[in-house]
Amino acid sequence: MNILAVDSSGKRAGAAIMKDGNIIAEILLNTGLTHSEMLMVVIDKAFELTKMTPSDIDFFSATTGPGSFTGLRIGISTIKGLSMGVGKKCISVPTLKAMAEISQLSDTLIVPVIDARRNRVYSSLYLRNVEGVLSQLITDSVFEITELYDIIKSFNKTVSFVGDVDIIKNSGIFKGITTIPLPDSHSFLRASHVAITAAKLQSEGMFCEPEYLNPNYLLPSQAEREYNKNNQ
């Protein structure tokens, strides 16, 4: 089974191809260009290196949020177009769930974090057992920093933060919690993590027709905020 996975939820643009459970290609760009400029470049390069085409892919996957509103839209529309072109199905990969795959620590609270601005974060909590099975403990949500601290503290466990960890460090309120820092090279989401998550979701029957692949922003977009403001 072949899976194409893309991530455009943050500053980086990435694409990975998984073949029968193994990552055979992964391309990552962090050049400062827009996702509309970068994403097809990394996808085309992944196909070139593997001598594959979209027709060889069984499932197309993308991070669907939370994350950059524009980045998510570009990634999802790109994957929709590719999958529709060859008549294949899609896999919606929650960004925080894919981020949790970064940490392989067991019996440690895995906390993916994305900066939502105004002292808020998108986050969730995961726990990996000794067999390596990852379980989600709370639903993806938007939290005030202090609220997230209270939730984490209640579990009384060592914590592994992944993602935008600087906002956690700079808050100054997490000093009483024991944390295990990850190397910088393992602190951000890669398309390979998206592919790994997509394969697990596919095995659970969690896939859809391309038209049903939609973003989950968790917060209203700027256009929605302006509309609501103008119609109050």
Image (cartoon, helix red, strand yellow):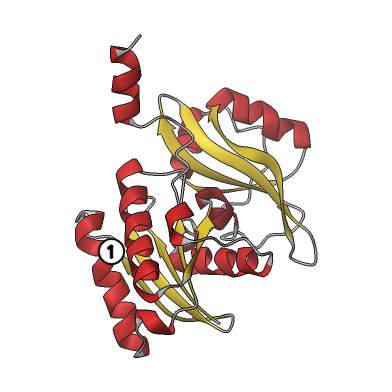
Residue 189 in sight here = no
Q: Is residue 149 above or below residue 98?
A: above
State the image quarter where residue 68 is shown: top left
Side of 31 where 119 appears, left or right: right
Q: Residue at x 48, y 56 (%)?
A: 187
Q: Residue at x 56, y 65 (%)?
A: 198
Q: The disc labelled 1 sits on which kind of residue?
A: Leu
Return the x and y of residue 53 as percentages of the image width and height: 34, 84
Q: Residue at x 22, y 57 (%)?
A: 36
Q: Is residue 114 above or below residue 173?
A: below
Residue under numbered circle 1: 39
Give the total number of marks visible in the rendering. 1
Q: Of 78 and 188, which appears nearest the observer?
A: 78
Q: Of 177 and 201, which appears nearest the observer?
A: 201
Side of 47 where 192 appears, left or right: right
Q: Of 231 and 172, which appears nearest the observer?
A: 231
**Which quadrant of the rendered structure holds the N terminus?**
bottom right
Q: Element type at marker 1?
A: helix
Return the x and y of residue 232 as percentages of the image width and height: 35, 9
Side of 100 where 231 appears, left or right: left
Residue 89 in sight here = yes
Q: Residues within 10 Å of mark 1 (few under 14, many from 20)?
A: many
Q: Report the residue that reaches farthest toward the top.
A: 232
Return the x and y of residue 90 as percentages of the image width and height: 49, 64
